[in-house]
């Protein structure tokens, strides 16, 4: 229930932001945003995000056991995106992650809605079940759910480069992600968001 209120609150905030920055399209955006059945989108988004999270975690845990952080980083570098595509399993749904401090440049926020969602979700806490649904100009809708540094294992690859990462981990990250911004996190910090776009049904 709480997330629905957040959604409506955010839709209002985002249309207010749009009114300040983009007066021409604001009324049209507001109209299309308000016709979204947000509760259905949230239900489907929650289900997919939970499934994506557990699928990825199962793969990461297995890779960590088999070969430690360096092997797991190499595995994530090549497999993370395709694992997430297979969770979506529908050409009308695109599922991925975004972050303001991204490791993979493909996870950079690109749209105005991405930036709105990140700003709004940054101040949420791991215990709240916040999600956001925003309407796109093309009639599709995007669901966002925050991701936090939820377990100590995350710090092995996203924590303090000096005290949490091993030398090997730092080296492989530098070679695979020369622009890496995704270290220096502490437990419980906001790490990014699930982003699930649902194309408008024909
Ligand atoms: C073994 C190292 C490793 C561990 C452990 C790890 N990650 Fe990552 N993480 C990575 C790599 C590598 C990527 C980039 C994947 C890619 O190229 O698609 C990544 C990407 C991400 C992204 C996508 C955004 C971005 O920066 O590109 C998020 C969000 C994320 N990790 C969160 C977490 C969380 C939360 C945990 C703990 C549950 C965790 N990670 C544990 C290595 C790790």
Image (cartoon, rainbow, N blue to C red):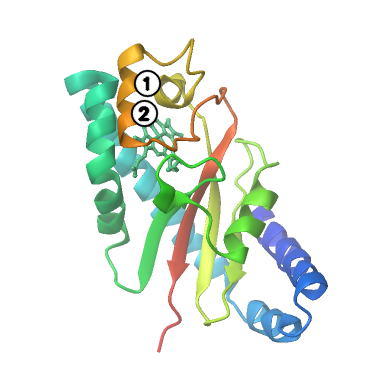
Q: Position of residue 29 (x, y in %)?
A: 68, 80
Residue 58, above or below 153: below
**Which element type, helix, strand or loop, lies under badge 2?**
helix
Q: Residues within 10 Å of mark 1 (few under 14, many from 20)?
A: some
**Mark 1 lies within 8 Å of ligand 1 (Cβ measured):** no
Q: Compute the Cα span from label 2 to label 1.
A: 6 Å
Q: Position of residue 92 (x, y in %)?
A: 35, 74
- What residue lies at 31% left-to-right and 35% top-to-bottom? 176
**Mark 2 lies within 8 Å of ligand 1 (Cβ measured):** no
Mark 2 touches mark 1? (CB < 8 Å) = yes
Residue 30, above or below 107: below
Residue 202, above or below 162: below
Q: Quadrant of ligand 1?
A: top left
Q: Specify the label residue 174 is tagged with.
A: 2
The extreme left residue here reads 66
Q: Residues within 10 Å of mark 2 (few under 14, many from 20)?
A: few
Q: Nearer the viewer, residue 45 or 158?
A: 158
- What residue lies at 65% left-to-right and 77% top-to-bottom? 33
Q: Which image quadrant is residue 87 in?
A: bottom left
Q: Which image quadrant is residue 197 in?
A: bottom left
Q: Label 1, on which residue?
A: 170
Q: Position of residue 46 (x, y in %)?
A: 48, 55
- What residue lies at 32% left-to-right and 61% top-to-bottom? 88
Horizontal side of 74 relative to 53 (left or right) equals: left
Quarter holding the C terminus is bottom left
Would you say residue 133 is visible in this rendering?
A: no
């Amino acid at each position: 229930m709480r997330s629905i209120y957040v959604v409506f609150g955010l839709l209002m905030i985002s249309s207010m932001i749009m009114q300040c920055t983009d007066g021409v399209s604001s009324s049209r955006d507001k109209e299309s945003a308000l016709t979204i059945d947000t509760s259905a989108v949230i239900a489907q988004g929650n289900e997919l995000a939970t499934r994506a999270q557990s699928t990825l975690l199962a793969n990461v845990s297995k890779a960590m056991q088999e070969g430690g952080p360096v092997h797991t980083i190499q595995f994530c570098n090549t497999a993370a995106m395709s694992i997430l595509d297979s969770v979506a399993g529908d050409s009308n749904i695109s599922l991925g992650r975004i972050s303001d401090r991204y490791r993979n440049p493909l996870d950079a926020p690109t749209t105005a809605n991405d930036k709105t969602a990140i700003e709004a979700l940054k101040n949420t806490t791991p215990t709240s079940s916040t999600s956001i649904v925003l309407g796109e100009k093309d009639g599709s809708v995007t669901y966002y759910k925050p991701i936090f540094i939820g377990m100590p294992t995350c710090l092995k690859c996203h924590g303090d480069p000096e005290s949490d990462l091993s030398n090997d981990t730092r080296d492989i990250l530098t070679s695979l992600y020369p622009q890496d911004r995704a270290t220096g996190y502490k437990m419980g910090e906001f790490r990014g968001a699930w982003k699930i776009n649902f194309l408008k049904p024909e």
